[in-house]
Image (cartoon, grey):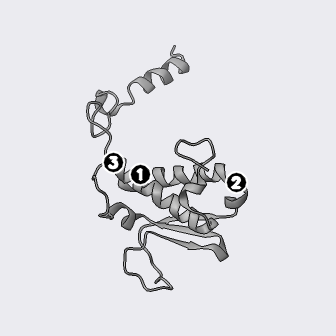
Amino acid sequence: MHNSRSTARRRGVHANRHGRGMRSPVSGPELPILYNRIAAFDRVAGGTVEYLRSLWPGELDRVRFDFVSIPVTPSPEPVTEPQLWRVDAANHRITFYRVPLQRSGKLHVEDAAHRRMFIEYAVYSAVAEYLGKEPWELLPPEAPGHHF
Protein backbone atom coordinates (compact mmCIF):
# COMPACT_ATOMS: atom_id res chain seq x y z
CA MET A 1 0.00 0.00 0.00
CA HIS A 2 1.42 3.35 -1.05
CA ASN A 3 1.40 6.32 1.25
CA SER A 4 0.24 9.43 -0.69
CA ARG A 5 2.69 11.57 1.25
CA SER A 6 5.73 9.56 0.16
CA THR A 7 4.50 9.61 -3.46
CA ALA A 8 4.23 13.39 -3.41
CA ARG A 9 7.71 13.66 -1.97
CA ARG A 10 9.12 11.31 -4.58
CA ARG A 11 7.46 13.26 -7.40
CA GLY A 12 9.02 16.50 -6.14
CA VAL A 13 12.48 14.97 -6.29
CA HIS A 14 11.99 13.73 -9.85
CA ALA A 15 10.18 16.81 -11.11
CA ASN A 16 13.38 18.15 -12.69
CA ARG A 17 13.57 18.03 -16.45
CA HIS A 18 14.76 14.60 -17.64
CA GLY A 19 16.36 13.90 -14.26
CA ARG A 20 19.15 16.44 -14.84
CA GLY A 21 18.70 18.31 -11.60
CA MET A 22 18.01 21.96 -11.03
CA ARG A 23 19.07 24.41 -13.70
CA SER A 24 21.44 27.25 -12.97
CA PRO A 25 21.35 30.78 -14.41
CA VAL A 26 22.56 31.12 -17.99
CA SER A 27 25.70 32.91 -16.83
CA GLY A 28 26.57 30.14 -14.39
CA PRO A 29 27.73 30.57 -10.82
CA GLU A 30 31.30 31.49 -11.80
CA LEU A 31 30.35 34.45 -14.02
CA PRO A 32 29.29 37.86 -12.71
CA ILE A 33 25.70 38.98 -13.02
CA LEU A 34 25.11 40.90 -16.24
CA TYR A 35 25.13 44.68 -15.92
CA ASN A 36 21.81 46.35 -16.60
CA ARG A 37 22.15 50.10 -17.26
CA ILE A 38 18.51 50.91 -16.61
CA ALA A 39 18.41 49.06 -13.29
CA ALA A 40 21.75 50.58 -12.25
CA PHE A 41 20.50 54.08 -13.06
CA ASP A 42 17.24 53.53 -11.19
CA ARG A 43 19.15 52.20 -8.19
CA VAL A 44 21.56 55.17 -8.01
CA ALA A 45 19.06 57.92 -8.82
CA GLY A 46 16.27 56.39 -6.74
CA GLY A 47 18.58 55.86 -3.78
CA THR A 48 19.74 59.47 -3.95
CA VAL A 49 16.14 60.70 -4.12
CA GLU A 50 15.21 58.63 -1.05
CA TYR A 51 18.24 59.96 0.84
CA LEU A 52 17.27 63.56 0.05
CA ARG A 53 13.65 62.86 1.01
CA SER A 54 14.90 61.66 4.40
CA LEU A 55 16.87 64.91 4.85
CA TRP A 56 14.11 67.24 3.59
CA PRO A 57 10.81 65.45 4.35
CA GLY A 58 8.64 68.55 4.67
CA GLU A 59 9.88 70.09 1.44
CA LEU A 60 9.96 66.92 -0.71
CA ASP A 61 7.03 64.82 0.51
CA ARG A 62 4.68 66.19 -2.19
CA VAL A 63 7.25 66.06 -5.00
CA ARG A 64 6.84 63.44 -7.70
CA PHE A 65 10.12 62.14 -9.14
CA ASP A 66 9.98 60.60 -12.60
CA PHE A 67 12.71 58.70 -14.43
CA VAL A 68 12.23 58.53 -18.20
CA SER A 69 14.55 57.66 -21.07
CA ILE A 70 14.56 60.94 -22.99
CA PRO A 71 12.67 64.24 -23.02
CA VAL A 72 9.40 63.79 -24.89
CA THR A 73 8.12 67.35 -24.64
CA PRO A 74 10.13 70.31 -25.88
CA SER A 75 11.74 72.53 -23.29
CA PRO A 76 9.99 75.89 -22.80
CA GLU A 77 13.40 77.57 -23.18
CA PRO A 78 15.96 77.20 -25.98
CA VAL A 79 18.30 74.28 -25.24
CA THR A 80 21.99 74.41 -26.15
CA GLU A 81 23.11 71.39 -24.09
CA PRO A 82 21.50 68.00 -23.46
CA GLN A 83 18.60 68.26 -21.06
CA LEU A 84 19.39 66.08 -18.02
CA TRP A 85 16.35 66.89 -15.88
CA ARG A 86 13.31 69.12 -15.78
CA VAL A 87 11.90 70.86 -12.71
CA ASP A 88 8.20 71.73 -12.71
CA ALA A 89 7.82 73.44 -9.32
CA ALA A 90 4.22 74.48 -9.98
CA ASN A 91 3.18 70.83 -10.30
CA HIS A 92 5.68 69.54 -7.69
CA ARG A 93 7.45 67.35 -10.22
CA ILE A 94 11.07 66.60 -11.12
CA THR A 95 11.81 64.48 -14.18
CA PHE A 96 15.21 62.91 -14.85
CA TYR A 97 16.29 61.81 -18.34
CA ARG A 98 18.25 58.57 -18.09
CA VAL A 99 19.86 58.40 -21.54
CA PRO A 100 21.35 61.93 -21.53
CA LEU A 101 22.58 61.41 -17.96
CA GLN A 102 24.21 58.09 -18.79
CA ARG A 103 25.77 59.30 -22.03
CA SER A 104 27.05 62.63 -20.83
CA GLY A 105 30.60 63.06 -22.07
CA LYS A 106 31.66 65.51 -19.37
CA LEU A 107 33.32 62.99 -17.04
CA HIS A 108 37.04 63.41 -16.51
CA VAL A 109 37.34 59.66 -15.74
CA GLU A 110 35.02 57.18 -17.44
CA ASP A 111 34.28 54.53 -14.83
CA ALA A 112 31.38 53.29 -12.70
CA ALA A 113 32.28 55.42 -9.67
CA HIS A 114 32.40 58.69 -11.63
CA ARG A 115 29.20 57.80 -13.52
CA ARG A 116 27.47 57.20 -10.17
CA MET A 117 28.76 60.50 -8.78
CA PHE A 118 27.52 62.32 -11.88
CA ILE A 119 24.02 60.85 -11.51
CA GLU A 120 24.00 61.73 -7.79
CA TYR A 121 25.18 65.25 -8.64
CA ALA A 122 22.34 65.61 -11.17
CA VAL A 123 19.76 64.53 -8.57
CA TYR A 124 21.20 66.97 -6.01
CA SER A 125 21.23 69.77 -8.60
CA ALA A 126 17.63 69.17 -9.69
CA VAL A 127 16.36 69.00 -6.09
CA ALA A 128 18.35 72.14 -5.23
CA GLU A 129 16.79 73.92 -8.21
CA TYR A 130 13.33 72.86 -7.03
CA LEU A 131 14.02 74.10 -3.47
CA GLY A 132 15.75 77.30 -4.59
CA LYS A 133 19.04 76.29 -2.95
CA GLU A 134 22.56 75.36 -3.97
CA PRO A 135 23.37 71.61 -4.11
CA TRP A 136 25.80 71.76 -1.17
CA GLU A 137 23.09 73.36 0.98
CA LEU A 138 21.18 70.07 0.86
CA LEU A 139 23.79 68.27 2.95
CA PRO A 140 23.12 67.75 6.64
CA PRO A 141 25.21 70.00 8.93
CA GLU A 142 27.28 67.05 10.19
CA ALA A 143 28.26 65.90 6.68
CA PRO A 144 31.97 65.96 5.78
CA GLY A 145 32.85 69.12 3.90
CA HIS A 146 29.79 71.01 5.14
CA HIS A 147 31.11 74.34 6.43
CA PHE A 148 27.94 76.31 7.15
**Quarter residue 119 falls in:** bottom left
Q: Which three-letter amino acid code belongs to the residue tagged 2?
A: Pro
**Quarter residue 105 falls in:** bottom left
The residue depicted at 70 percent of the width and 63 percent of the height is 62
Query: How crowded is the residue under tag 3: few (<14 C-alpha within 10 Å), some, or many (20+)?
Result: few
The answer to whether residue 142 is above or below residue 12 is below
**Quarter residue 16 falls in:** top left
Horizontal side of 34 relative to 84 (left or right) equals left
Instruction: Return the residue found at the far right.
Output: 58
**Which disc, if any, is residue 112?**
3
The residue depicted at 39 percent of the width and 63 percent of the height is 101
CA gap, disc 2 and disc 3: 29 Å
Q: Which residue is mark 1?
A: 117
**Which disc, if any, is residue 57?**
2
Query: How crowded is the residue under tag 1: few (<14 C-alpha within 10 Å), some, or many (20+)?
Result: few
Q: Which three-letter amino acid code belongs to the residue tagged 1?
A: Met
Q: Which three-letter amino acid code belongs to the residue tagged 3?
A: Ala
Q: Earlier in the sequence, mark 1 or mark 3?
A: 3
The answer to whether residue 131 is above or below residue 3 is below
Residues marked 1 and 3 touching at CB (< 8 Å): no
